[in-house]
């Protein structure tokens, strides 16, 4: 328990150093119909089309960077998050991840609810554990 608390404090300090404000009057990313995923062409041990940077780097807006090995980091627009995931067919599966828990006025922190994602037409579509689409991020 003490290790978890220390890790959370370290992550919170790192996030507070990198986040330059949490409030935004901009609405959360729009939720659109689910596009058809692209067939996976990922090399073994990589996450293929999912690797890269997604979303916009602006205060109050979600963004995510996924490394080719599945590790990811980003922000839900307010809270920093980091973890690792893997490819399962044409779906990226978010593994356990750490997130800060800052309350930010005007920000809808949907990215911290991510369970899976698909890619189609340079758009990352993110889903909850129940399969409900919760948002999209465009590749940058």
Image: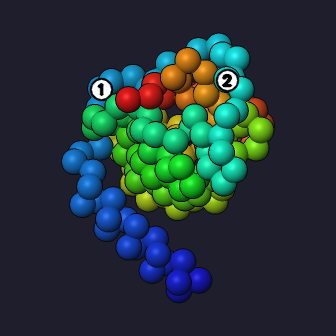
Q: Of residues 57 and 21, which is closer to you in this image?
A: 57
Q: x and y percent of residue 87 in the render? A: 70, 45
Residue name at image x 44 percent, y 28 percent: 139
For residue 109, side relative to residue 44 (left or right): left
Would residue 106 be seen by someone viewing this image from the given angle? Answer: no
**Residue 131 sits above or below residue 79 on the image:** above
Give coordinates of residue 43: x percent, y percent: 65, 45
Q: Which residue is mark 1?
A: 25
Camera-side mark, 2 or 1: 2
Cα–Cα gap, marks 2 and 1:
33 Å
When the figure is inspected, residue 49 is found, relative to residue 14, above or below; the finding is above
Vertical relation: 10 (above or below) 80: below
Identify the residue at the far front of this view: 43
Q: In which quadrant of the rendered image does the C terminus lie? A: top left
Relative to 83, 23 lies left or right: left
The numbered disc on residue 38 is 2
Q: Residue at x 45, y 52 (%)?
A: 73
- Name which residue lies at 71% across and 37% down: 91
Is residue 7 something one can see in this rendering?
A: yes
- In primary-sequence order, the first of circles 2 and 1 is 1
Q: Are marks 2 and 1 in contact (CB under 8 Å)?
A: no
Choose between 25 and 50: the one closer to the eye.
50
Location of residue 116 in the rendering, given as x and y in whole percent from the top left corner = 68, 40
> In terms of secondary structure, where does tag 1 sit?
loop
Q: Residues within 10 Å of mark 2 (few under 14, many from 20)?
A: some
């Amino acid at each position: 328990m003490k290790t978890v608390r220390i890790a959370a404090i370290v992550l919170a300090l790192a996030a507070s150093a990198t986040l330059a404000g949490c409030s935004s009057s901009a609405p959360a990313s729009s939720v659109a119909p689910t596009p058809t995923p692209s067939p996976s062409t990922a090399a073994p041990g990589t996450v293929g089309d999912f690797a890269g940077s997604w979303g916009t780097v602006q205060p109050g807006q979600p963004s995510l960077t996924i490394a080719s090995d599945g590790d990811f980091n980003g922000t839900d627009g307010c809270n920093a998050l980091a973890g690792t995931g893997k490819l399962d067919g044409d779906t990226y599966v978010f593994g356990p991840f750490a997130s800060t828990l800052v309350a930010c006025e005007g920000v809808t922190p949907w990215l911290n609810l991510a369970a899976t994602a698909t890619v189609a037409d340079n758009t990352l579509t993110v889903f909850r554990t129940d399969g409900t689409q919760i948002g999209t991020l465009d590749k940058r």
